[in-house]
Amino acid sequence: MPDVLSAPLVVEFPFTRSLGPVQSAFLTGLRERTVLGVRTDDGTVLVPPVEYDPVTANELGDLVEVAPTGTVTTWAWNPSPRRDQPLDTPFAWVLVRLDGAGTALLHVLDAPGPDAVRTGMRVRIRWAATRTGAITDIACFEPYEGDPGPTEPAPHSGEFTDPVTGIVAPARLDYVHTPGRAQSAYIKALEERRTVGERCPACRKVYVPPRGACPTCGVATAEQVEVGPRGTVTTFCIVNIKAKNLDIEVPYVYAHIALDGADLALHGRIAGIPYDQVRMGLRVEPVWSEGARHVDHYRPTGEPDADYDTYKELV
């Protein structure tokens, strides 16, 4: 049995979204050291605010200002902060019901240890020194022994100078990927510029890349089958938006390619032909990256196009 591969993998992308009037007012308010909530149809003040009533689904817009002080409703201690968390020293995750609010806000509490945290303790906002209109404008909460804020929130217009209208939220996932026995064998074969799949013992279909089990029959697969290297374009799309950190000029074509002998199309880039001449049935062959263990792209072989009946089940 071949060694099973594993490697660290990071999936990361910035998620950009626009803000409606309620979220815009809330985040702009944080920049101005003001906490806004929204009043629902039954009078409950939601902090953070939402655009629609969670019970009636009616649109909400009755903004009110709540106090920067509140009460911890529940908490959990974090002894080992991770990268990009609000504090780099141990802290407590807390739900805080701000004075005047009817719901709790999730944030962090700066405390010397878990013995210093309790449900019902009084806290207040510690504002960030530099504020940009984000939830991180609240640097954290800290213990507070002073007077409580008003229980009745004050009406607020939600109007500010230079309001925040959009945010960019980075999304990142760090993990160790283990492709498993079947895909490890597939990846190792690519080092030899070969493409291998596995045949289902029941339906006899060959799956590339192999999955270790037939997705149709649900039985384990083990018989290796070398396929290709040539194949047929079954369907494709023209890419017109340049991806960050990808050195490929647009427009280019990305296609599903049914390698000869395979019963599942894999995807790859088509080059060596004008993008507007790529078509279903085009016969292609791989072009390998120099010094790498993967196909860089596929190019036309010069053969006549494949008949639609030979690949229609793979479209």
Image (spheres, grey):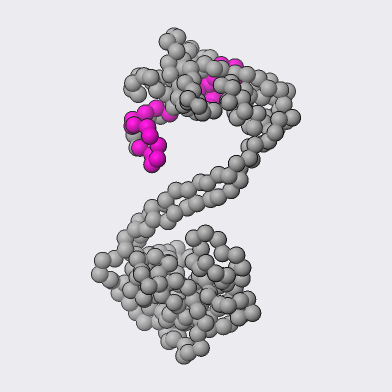
Q: Where is residue 10 drawn, in percent x and y? A: 52, 46
Q: Characterize the magenta stretch by its predominant secondary structure.
A: loop
Q: Is residue 247 magenta?
A: yes
Q: Where is residue 300 drawn, in percent x and y? A: 43, 16
Residue under the point 48% across and 89% down: 146
| Image side of residue 82 versus residue 272, left or right | right
| Image side of residue 258 versus residue 3, left or right | left
Q: Where is residue 199 drawn, in percent x and y? A: 68, 23
Q: Is residue 218 magenta?
A: no
Decide: is 159 above or below 302.
below
Residue 167 showing in the rendered view: yes
Q: Quadrant of the N terminus?
A: top right
Front-most of 238 and 171? 171
Decide: is 210 above or below 167.
above
Q: Quadrant of residue 209?
A: top right
Residue under the point 34% across and 31% down: 249
Which residues fall within the magenta stretch?
A: 242-266
Q: Quadrant of residue 136?
A: bottom left
Residue 43 showing in the rendered view: no
Residue under the point 44% across and 54% down: 170
Q: Where is residue 178 drawn, in percent x and y? A: 64, 40
Residue under the point 29% across and 65% down: 163
